[in-house]
Amino acid sequence: MINNQAEIYIKVPLDVAENYWNATEEERHKIEAKIAFYLQSSTISRQESLDKLYKTMDTIGQKTKERGLTPEILESLLNEDE
């Protein structure tokens, strides 16, 4: 690991690999930077989505408590069809 970097291996179609192998060193660095950006953006977006979901769940839980919904009442509502 140099400069806080690590190598990863991903499977790509053969023609994509050949294009990468035939690229100049500068072109390969640009490709690597784009892939790193994509992976980082994807991870951040996923975490933001999870954070939003957890916040929504917390809000729902708080509102149900404020309105008097207890675990026992919820259980009985869920079991009404049985």
Image (spheres, grey):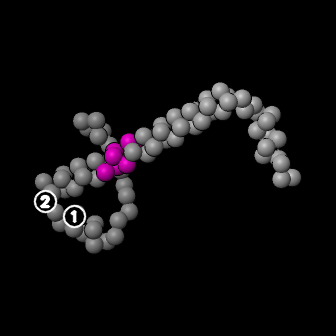
Question: Left of 15 or right of it: where is 23?
Answer: left
Using the rendered view, name the quadrant where residue 57 is placed.
Answer: top right
The residue segment tinted magenta is 38-44
SS at badge 1: helix
User: In the image shown, does 40 or 23 lie closer to the viewer?
Assistant: 40
Residue 19 horizontal/vertical position (percent) = 21, 68
**Identity of the residue drawn at 82% across and 41% down:** 76
In this view, 77 is above or below 9: above
In this view, 33 is above or below 23: above
Tell me the tag on residue 64: none
**Identity of the residue drawn at 52% across and 34% down:** 55
Q: Is residue 54 visible?
A: no
Q: Is residue 11 magenta?
A: no
The three-letter amino acid code for the residue at tag 1 is Trp
Farthest residue to the right: give it. Answer: 82
Q: Dot 1: few (<14), some (14–19), or many (≥20) neighbours within 10 Å?
A: few
**Identity of the residue drawn at 24% across and 36% down:** 3
Question: Which residue is disc 1 drawn over?
Answer: 21
SS at badge 2: loop
Using the rendered view, name the quadrant where residue 5 is placed.
Answer: top left
Question: Which residue is disc 2 drawn over?
Answer: 24
Question: Left of 5 or right of it: where is 68?
Answer: right
Determine the CA span between mark 2 and mark 1: 8 Å
Question: Left of 77 or right of it: where is 35?
Answer: left
The three-letter amino acid code for the residue at tag 2 is Thr
The number of numbered discs placed on residues in the rendered structure image is 2
Prevalent SS, magenta region: helix
User: In the image shown, does 50 or 32 lie closer to the viewer?
Assistant: 50
Farthest residue to the top: give it. Answer: 66
Using the rendered view, name the quadrant where residue 27 is placed.
Answer: bottom left
User: In the image shown, does 3 or 49 lie closer to the viewer?
Assistant: 49
Q: Is residue 78 visible?
A: yes
